[in-house]
Each structure stands twice: as structure tokens, then as C-alpha cells.
Image (cartoon, helix red, strand yellow):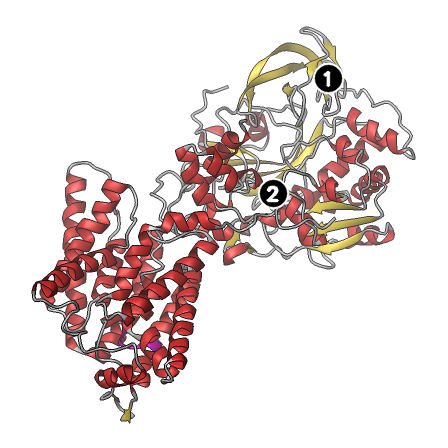
């Protein structure tokens, strides 16, 4: 018999055919819909922010990729899909009022420090790259604010979310919106849900984020428990606060749930796979604490509360995975 | 038969089974007895047999050539008539290491040494016949069937005709070719078990196997159509799917009064009881990525290369030969590896066939493996703990409950063979 040249392999020998790059490309595609909605609502500035963020990550990625290929090192990312998602998240997570160079800086830090850097030095992303970069930016901003003798950022100093009238009077920023074509004047709550020109670019239209996010979560199997838990917890907390303060619970819910920082973050940042829990209970708990911490930080007028909350919780991801695990088959209860 | 194109798994994942389509229509090609047979002493779960023949001794087809004392032992028989060429260690495709085998060279006229007569109305005699015939779980588990049949307090006997692997159809083919014989074997098993209820679990649709279903009905066998899903083919999950009963961790279905056997096993019992033939041959599906599925009837101990040669294939055109299915079979290092009595499939893949796990990427913790896992464990976390050799964590994550179905690897977008870490985790968790 001829000498065989057979390969020894363990099972399985087939694969579903869906890979990481496809997951990233489809995520990018879904976020592009949100980006388009944001550009329609917020205008050219939104487009520039997104293009700056995407351009920055692509330049960095291409440079590193070319270097790795040149040096015969296995490229960290064979496809630009994952860096593109990071860039898109940075673009959509920036406030529309941010200077363009800040967006470029955050994108640079995201791709270089927290995407490539974390992977290289920690073998895994423990912190959400875009969120961690923004926290660093916030830290710099806070130091500057403290240096000026202020505890809170000037943009937030007048906000009073601890009272019903305080919230009501803070809503002036969302009260001058008119839905185009229809010409319908929007109340602050309606604006927060449909069409807001203030705040995070990715949250310009909460309804678009909700629809696109839900489709993406179903289609691409995001960690939906985090999304559900975050939004439900925030809704309950906001409604409870509204009722407790004899205010307008609907406005409270609209403000706390539909500001871009939460609605976009819940679907596309808090579900970032590597930095979030794997277990079912861990994900529910993660969402619960994310919403609770965000809510608390929002009430305290802390700038970027949701981002800070996300990064803090990222640190405890492995602990969440140890809390409770679902009972496997064989442990659910004997029926004899 | 209207085989669905996909199996539906947990987490909305689908498994392509288009290769099965129409394959059950292909009759078994009966291969000639091999010129040389390699018969392993270990072809069952349990204590290994010792050879009962010596080098140079003449043997007849069906003659017992290996046995051992003890409850969990099953003898092996010569699949051909000839001379014992040697007794030596040969690579075992399932144990994945060299193991004792009796090598027989074909010589003289083919004959059959029949099994002794047993009283088929006596439960104990059926059980004894099952052991003497060398019958094991022929779906791939190799669990001694007589041990299952000896279980007491069994109320339900499930015949697993689900045949879930994506490239196996030999059981369905057997149901088409030998319906009366299969049912006869099922009834013998039910008699030994004393089970009140016999459930025939099939993925076929109503009217697709009319003769078999008619015979089943006449024999009081309940036909249950199981949803098209790969994982439901697992013994424990099939029990839950059909009866809503959970088999507790660390136990087997008889613990809750259920016994599961498959079609080929039932047919083997028929042959033992009525043709007095021990397990020396069986049907299997041969799949090649070039020509699809063929159904083959072969003698146990036949070398893989000889099977391929008999079917007209050039072995040099393949770079992977797998004993078993695409999902659960291990590839073998040599075409001289023999087939076993529980080899339900043989798969040959050409160099052009994708090698999806060749370039694995780091885990992205997407949780797909956790979503698809039919027994609700966390393969990704187990992989981490296996790498860190944290035995306590592996036990906490219930690694021992893994059924090794391979679905976690199948869906992994980073193309990681998680199954490898589940085996590793099990080995570590087993240690005291």
C-alpha cells in the first residue's frame, strides 16, 4: 500500500461559514444606517465627525497592517472590518459640539491604545476601546475644569436633575425642534425620541437606533440581555424618579433612556463582545448596574456618565461571569 | 424523502444537511470480504478483551476471537475465514493510540460459525445472546447493549432513528431495505427490557417509510416525529425531547426508566437471533466531497483503504479520511486503519475541501458557542479555564456535562475548535 499523506485532525470538520469579519462588516452596515439618520438630523458636522473617526482608524490600521505584512508578522486584523466598526463607534459616540480634532484624537487613542494596544499587551480587550478613549478625554476635561475651580463641566453646571422643575427647565435645549417636511413642532420628549440635534451623534434619532439596534441584535446575535436589562432598568429608575418627584415620568424616561449616550451605548457599545460578560445572569447584572450607575452619574451632573459607567463595569466583567451560571442539562430538576 | 436542507439548533443557528438529500435512496453496496482484517480487542466501552486465538491459528467467519470476564465486556468475532497472521498493537481510530488487534489473513472457503441457540422468549437468554453476538451501541457510542437490556424498571424503550449527523443516512437506508428485520430486533429488545412503551423516534415525515410505519403500527410501536435538529440526536436530549424527562447529570437514561437504542443495533440483534450471525458486518454511509454519499455494507476490520479501493476511489486524491461523521469523527493517520463494529460512517475529503479551523483567531467572546450549546454549558469560559488549568472552575462550569456534539466549534466566528478544550477540561475535571 502506498504511503499516505493524510492529515490528522480532530472533529468537527465543517463550519457554519460565518466568521468574525462578516460579523463586523454587518455591524458596520447596521451602524451606517444610524450614521445616515444622524447626518440627516444633525447635518454636515455629523458627517465630518464620522469621516474623521473612520479615516483616522483606517490610516492607523493600514499602517500597522502594512508594517506587519512587511515584517512577516501575522496581521492582528486581516480585514479592516473590525477597525472600521471601532471608528464608526467613535464617530457616533462623539457629541456633535465636540471640536473635530478631539474626534480625531479619540479615534487615534481608540485604535492605537485600546484596540491594538489592549490586544497586544493583555491578549484581550478588557475595556471597550471607544469608551476608554472617551474616558481619558473626559479625565483631561475634568482636570481642566477643576483647575478652573469648578466641580462640573460648564455645559452641565446649570443642570438640576434632582427636581422635577429642574429637569423641566433643562429641557429648553430639546424644545425648539421641528420635524421637517411635516413641519410638526416637537415637545422635548418627542424630540428625544425622534429628532434631536443636541448630544451624541449616534443618538440623533432614538427611534432609528431602537429599530436598527433591535434588528442588528437579532440578526447578529448581540448580547441582547445587556440591552434589555439596561433599557428596562433605566426606564424603571426614570419613571420611579419622575413619580417620586411629582414630575412628568414620560419626560424623565425620554431624557434618561433616549439621550444618545444611553440608547446608542446600550445597543452598540455595551454589547461589545470582548469587554462584556458571557453568562446570562452576568449580562442581566451588567445591564442593571450599567443603567443604575449611569442614572446616578447623570443625576450628579457628571459629564459622560454612561461612558464612565461602562468602563467601570468593563473592569468587573470577569466577576460578573462568576456570579451565577445557568443550570446545564442534567441539573435542572429530575422528573422520574 | 423530503429531508430538510437545514437542521435548526439552539440560538437560531442552522446546520446544512443538504448532503443527506436523496442519499437514503442509494442501496447498500455490499463489499467483498477483505483480504486482511484487523480486529481490535477493544470495540466497546468497558474492560478490554483478550485474544482467544493464537498466531497461526485458523479461524472461521463468526468465530469468537476475543473476550473477557466482567459485566462491561463484549466479545469480538472474526469477520472473515482465514489464518491469524499476528496479534499486535495497531493504531486505534477512536482510542487515538495503538491497541491490541488480531490480524487475520483471508484463506480457505468462506463459512460461518453460527451463534449458539438461545430461547427468544426468555429475557435472560436474549440478554445473553446480545452479549455473545458482540452487540454494542452501533450509532457510535459502543456501549455494551446487553448491559442496557439488563436494566430493570424500564418503562419506555426509545428507538433512535433520528440519525442526526449531517452526512450519515445508513440507518434510514436500513429502515427502507430491512423494515421487518429492524422491527423484529426492536421487539426483541423491548421483550428483554419489559418496557410497556416503545417509541420510534424518527426525523422522517408521515408516509415516507410506509412499510416500516405499517409494521410499527401492527407491533404497537409508537412513531414520534422529532424536529429536525442535530443535537436532539443525542441520547439524553432525545429523552427530554420525547418524554420531557431530564437524565440527571452523571447518570444514564435507565436511571429514569428509559433505554435508547438505535436502528443498526436493533438490526444486529435480529441477525444474531434469526440468522445466528454475530456482529461481523454492518452498514455505513461513505461520504466524499467529490461524489456525495454512498451506502456501503462492509465486514468489520476492513481497512479504510480497501473500502475506498472497492468503491473505485483513488486514495491519493484525499488528504483527510475520517471514521465517523463530519461533526464527530476523528481523521485517521493511515488508510490502513480498520473500521470498527460501531463505525457508522466514513468520510473522505479532498485537499480542496475547506479546512475551516486551520487559521483560528482569538476568541471575541461573542457568546455564539454558549447560545448554541444544547446542554447549556459555557464552552468559551471552559476554554479559558482549561487553558488556565483551573480544575475548580472547570467543575463549577459543569464541563462533565458536555456531550461533545461539536456545535460550539461549528458556530464559532473565530473558527476555534472549542471541542478540544472541552475534552481537555473533562480530563482535568475527572482527576481527583
Q: Residues within 10 Å of mark 2 (few under 14, many from 20)?
A: many
Q: Residues within 10 Å of mark 1 (few under 14, many from 20)?
A: some
Q: Nearer the viewer, residue B280 or B198?
A: B198
Side of B424 relative to A269 (left or right) = right
Give above or below for A312 relative to A211. Answer: above
- Of mark 1 and mark 2, the one earlier in the sequence is 1
Q: Is residue B173 magenta?
A: no
Asked whether residue A261 appears in the rendered view, the answer is: yes
- Residue B41, horizontal then vertical, whole percent: 66, 19
**What secondary structure is marked by label 2?**
loop
The circle drawn on residue B168 is 2
CA separation, marks 1 and 2?
Answer: 32 Å
Q: Please give the chain letter of the residue carrying mark 1.
A: B
Of badges 1 and 2, the one in the foreground is 1
Q: Quadrant of residue B384?
A: top left
Q: Nearer the viewer, residue B43 or B387?
A: B387
Side of A124 relative to A211 (left or right) = left
Give above or below for A299 relative to B412. Answer: below
Q: Is residue A204 magenta?
A: yes
Side of B170 relative to A189 (left or right) = right
Say which residue label 1 marks: B68
Q: Residue at x 30, y 59 (%)?
A: A310
> Are the residues under marks 1 and 2 on the same chain?
yes
Q: Nearer the viewer, residue B21 or A130?
A: A130
Q: Nearer the viewer, residue A197 or B265?
A: A197
- Residue A53, horizontal then vertical, whole percent: 17, 62
- Give, as a single range, the part of the protein colored magenta: A203-208
Q: Quadrant of residue A182?
A: bottom left
Q: Please give the chain letter of the residue carrying mark 2.
A: B
**What secondary structure is marked by label 1?**
loop
Amino acid at each position: 500500500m502506498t504511503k499516505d499523506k493524510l492529515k490528522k485532525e480532530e472533529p468537527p470538520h465543517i463550519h457554519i461559514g460565518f466568521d468574525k469579519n462578516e460579523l463586523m462588516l454587518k455591524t458596520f452596515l447596521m451602524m451606517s444606517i444610524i450614521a445616515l439618520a444622524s447626518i440627516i438630523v444633525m447635518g454636515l458636522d455629523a458627517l465630518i465627525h464620522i469621516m474623521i473617526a473612520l479615516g483616522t482608524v483606517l490610516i492607523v490600521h493600514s499602517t500597522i497592517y502594512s508594517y506587519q505584512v512587511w515584517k512577516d508578522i501575522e496581521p492582528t486584523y486581516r480585514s479592516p472590518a473590525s477597525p472600521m466598526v471601532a471608528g464608526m463607534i467613535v464617530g457616533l459616540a462623539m457629541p456633535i459640539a465636540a471640536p473635530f480634532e478631539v474626534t480625531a484624537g479619540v479615534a487615534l487613542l481608540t485604535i492605537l491604545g485600546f484596540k491594538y494596544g489592549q490586544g497586544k499587551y493583555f491578549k484581550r480587550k478588557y475595556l471597550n476601546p471607544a469608551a476608554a478613549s472617551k474616558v481619558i478625554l473626559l479625565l483631561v476635561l475634568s482636570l481642566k475644569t477643576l483647575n478652573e475651580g469648578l466641580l462640573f463641566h460648564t455645559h452641565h453646571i446649570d443642570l438640576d436633575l434632582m427636581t422635577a422643575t429642574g429637569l423641566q427647565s433643562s429641557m429648553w435645549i430639546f424644545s425648539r425642534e421641528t420635524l421637517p417636511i411635516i413641519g410638526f413642532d416637537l415637545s422635548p420628549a418627542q424630540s428625544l425620541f425622534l429628532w434631536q440635534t443636541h448630544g451624541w451623534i449616534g443618538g440623533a434619532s432614538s427611534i432609528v437606533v431602537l429599530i436598527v439596534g433591535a434588528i442588528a441584535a437579532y440578526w447578529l446575535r448581540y448580547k441582547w440581555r445587556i440591552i434589555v436589562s439596561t433599557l428596562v432598568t433605566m426606564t424603571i429608575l426614570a419613571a420611579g424618579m419622575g413619580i417620586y418627584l411629582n414630575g412628568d415620568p414620560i419626560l424623565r424616561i425620554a431624557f434618561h433612556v433616549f439621550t444618545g449616550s444611553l440608547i446608542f451605548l446600550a445597543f452598540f457599545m455595551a454589547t461589545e463582545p470582548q469587554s462584556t460578560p458571557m453568562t446570562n445572569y452576568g449580562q442581566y447584572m451588567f445591564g442593571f448596574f450599567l443603567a443604575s450607575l449611569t442614572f446616578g452619574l447623570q443625576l450628579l451632573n457628571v459629564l459622560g456618565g454612561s461612558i464612565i459607567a461602562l468602563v467601570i463595569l468593563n473592569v468587573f466583567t470577569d466577576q460578573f461571569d462568576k456570579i451565577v451560571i445557568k443550570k446545564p442539562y442534567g441539573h435542572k430538576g429530575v422528573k422520574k | 424523502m423530503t429531508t430538510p436542507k437545514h437542521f435548526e439548533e439552539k440560538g437560531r443557528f442552522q446546520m446544512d444537511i443538504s448532503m443527506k438529500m436523496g442519499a437514503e435512496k442509494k442501496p447498500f453496496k455490499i463489499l467483498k470480504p477483505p483480504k486482511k482484517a484487523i480486529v481490535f480487542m477493544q470495540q466497546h466501552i468497558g474492560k478490554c478483551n483478550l485474544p482467544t486465538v493464537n498466531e497461526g491459528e485458523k479461524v472461521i467467519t463468526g468465530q469468537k476471537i476475543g473476550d473477557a470476564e466482567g459485566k462491561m465486556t463484549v466479545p469480538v468475532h472474526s469477520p472473515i475465514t482465514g489464518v491469524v497472521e499476528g496479534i499486535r498493537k495497531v493504531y486505534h481510530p477512536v482510542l487515538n493510540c495503538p491497541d491490541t488487534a488480531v490480524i487475520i489473513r483471508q484463506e480457505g472457503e468462506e463459512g460461518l460459525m453460527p451463534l449458539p441457540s438461545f430461547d427468544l422468549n426468555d429475557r435472560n437468554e436474549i440478554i445473553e445472546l446480545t452479549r455473545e453476538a458482540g452487540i454494542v451501541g452501533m450509532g457510535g457510542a459502543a456501549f455494551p447493549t446487553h448491559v442496557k437490556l439488563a436494566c430493570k424498571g424500564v418503562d419506555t424503550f426509545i428507538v433512535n432513528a433520528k440519525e442526526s449527523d449531517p452526512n450519515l443516512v445508513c440507518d434510514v437506508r436500513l429502515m427502507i431495505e430491512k423494515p421487518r428485520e429492524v422491527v423484529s430486533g426492536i421487539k426483541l429488545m423491548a421483550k428483554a427490557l419489559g418496557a410497556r412503551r416503545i417509541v420510534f423516534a424518527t426525523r422522517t415525515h408521515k408516509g415516507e417509510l410506509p412499510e416500516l410505519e405499517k409494521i410499527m403500527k401492527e407491533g404497537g410501536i409508537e412513531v414520534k416525529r422529532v424536529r429536525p435538529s442535530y443535537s436532539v440526536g443525542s441520547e439524553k436530549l432525545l429523552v427530554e425531547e420525547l418524554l420531557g424527562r431530564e437524565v440527571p447529570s452523571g447518570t444514564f437514561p435507565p436511571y429514569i426508566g428509559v433505554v435508547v437504542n438505535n436502528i443498526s443495533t436493533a438490526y444486529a440483534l435480529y441477525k444474531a437471533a434469526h440468522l445466528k450471525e454475530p456482529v461481523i458486518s454492518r452498514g455505513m454511509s461513505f461520504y466524499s466531497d467529490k461524489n456525495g454519499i454512498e451506502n456501503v455494507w462492509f465486514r468489520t476490520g476492513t481497512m479504510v483503504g480497501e473500502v475506498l479501493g472497492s468503491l473505485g476511489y483513488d486514495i491519493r486524491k484525499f488528504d483527510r479520511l475520517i471514521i465517523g461523521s463530519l461533526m464527530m469523527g476523528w481523521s485517521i493517520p493511515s488508510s490502513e486503519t480498520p473500521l470498527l463494529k460501531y463505525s457508522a460512517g466514513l468520510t473522505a475529503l479532498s485537499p480542496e475541501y475547506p479546512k475551516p479551523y486551520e487559521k483560528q483567531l482569538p476568541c471575541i467572546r461573542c457568546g455564539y458557542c454558549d447560545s448554541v450549546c444544547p446542554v447549556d454549558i459555557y464552552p468559551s469560559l471552559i476554554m479559558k479555564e482549561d487553558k488556565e488549568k483551573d480544575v475548580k472552575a472547570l467543575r463549577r462550569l459543569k464541563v462533565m456535562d458536555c456531550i461533545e456534539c461539536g456545535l460550539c466549534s461549528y458556530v464559532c466566528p473565530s473558527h476555534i475548535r472549542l471541542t478540544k478544550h472541552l475534552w481537555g477540561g473533562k480530563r482535568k475535571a475527572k482527576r481527583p
